[in-house]
Image (cartoon, helix red, strand yellow):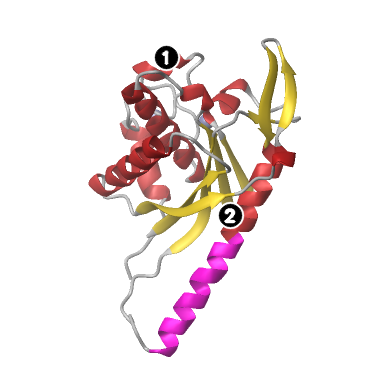
């Protein structure tokens, strides 16, 4: 099983909503027979020092600098991997769970309540909107702000976020953007995102399935 660590970065509100989306994403993977699961790792504290003020056309915006957030998530992932190894070792010493499927976690997903900002001028608009996926060698860090998805209608909000998570996980498993009616097709405006179906197109799904390199033995 490919495990994807899942954390709240700092004081995220909308906890109930995020918990629902989290369950929905895992239910989706399960129903599609994809050996991928999100694993909730709790909250990751970001000190107030991380929050920066950014000048935009629409005035001052508070946000988290992407570089700081990805570094923290990277550290959290390494720490979690060490804990998993430690537990596995203890189990092996006690000769328990011999037939346990070996799962690996080399991906982590961070959900933020504030916009993500970056000094990187090459970061394109879509990625700012949908989130970021960054590689640290074989480790992958995904960051998604719920800010662009907010809506008074919780159902709409939830659906947007669900699709956003699938989009980032898709990238983490090697998918590129696509032109079809698919979560891998990034929108120019949020209205477009609402029209996208909440699933991968057939071609992206096949590629995703192929890229999940997991063997049952
Ligand atoms: Zn993308
Ligand atoms: Zn597609």
Q: Quadrant of the N terminus?
A: bottom left
What residue is at 56 percent from the left and 43 percent from the top? Answer: 9
Q: Report x, y in % for residue 40.
A: 43, 53
Query: Mark 2: few, some, or many residues within 10 Å (few <14, many ≥20)?
Result: some
Cα separation, mark 2 vs mark 1, equals 31 Å
**Looking at the magenta stretch, what is its main secondary structure?**
helix
Residue 88 vs 107, above or below: the answer is below
The residue range painted magenta reads: 78-94
Please give left or right for residue 170 compared with residue 120 in the image.
left
Q: Report x, y in % for residue 109.
A: 51, 46
Residue 102, label in figure: none
Residue annotated with mark 1: 192
Residue annotated with mark 2: 139
What is the secondary structure assignment of the residue under circle 2? strand
Please give left or right for residue 146 compared with residue 196 in the image.
right
Asked whether 8 or 105 is in front, the reply is 8
Q: Is residue 106 visible from the viewing direction of this image?
A: yes
Query: Mark 1: few, some, or many residues within 10 Å (few <14, many ≥20)?
Result: few
Q: Quadrant of the C terminus?
A: bottom left
Q: Report x, y in % for residue 87.
A: 47, 76
What is the secondary structure assignment of the residue under circle 1? helix
- N-term-proximal mark, 2 vs 1: 2
């Amino acid at each position: 099983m490919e495990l994807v660590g899942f954390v709240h970065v700092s004081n995220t509100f909308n906890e109930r909503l995020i918990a629902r989306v989290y369950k929905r994403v895992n239910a989706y993977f399960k129903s599609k027979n994809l050996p991928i699961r999100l694993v909730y790792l709790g909250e990751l504290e970001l000190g107030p020092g991380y929050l920066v003020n950014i000048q935009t056309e629409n005035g001052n915006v508070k946000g988290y600098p992407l570089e700081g957030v990805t570094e923290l998530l990277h550290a959290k992932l390494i720490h979690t991997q060490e804990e998993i190894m430690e537990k596995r070792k203890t189990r092996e010493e006690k000769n328990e769970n011999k037939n346990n499927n070996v799962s690996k976690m080399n991906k982590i997903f961070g959900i933020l309540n504030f916009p993500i900002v970056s000094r990187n001028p090459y970061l394109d608009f879509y990625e700012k909107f949908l989130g970021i996926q960054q590689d640290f060698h074989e480790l992958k860090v995904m960051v998604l702000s719920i800010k662009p998805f907010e809506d008074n209608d919780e159902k709409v909000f939830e659906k947007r976020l669900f699709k956003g998570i699938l989009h980032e996980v898709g990238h983490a498993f090697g998918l590129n953007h696509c032109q079809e009616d698919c979560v891998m097709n990034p929108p120019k405006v949020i209205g477009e995102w609402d029209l996208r179906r909440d699933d991968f197109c057939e071609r992206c799904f096949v590629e995703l399935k192929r890229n999940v390199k997991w063997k049952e033995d």
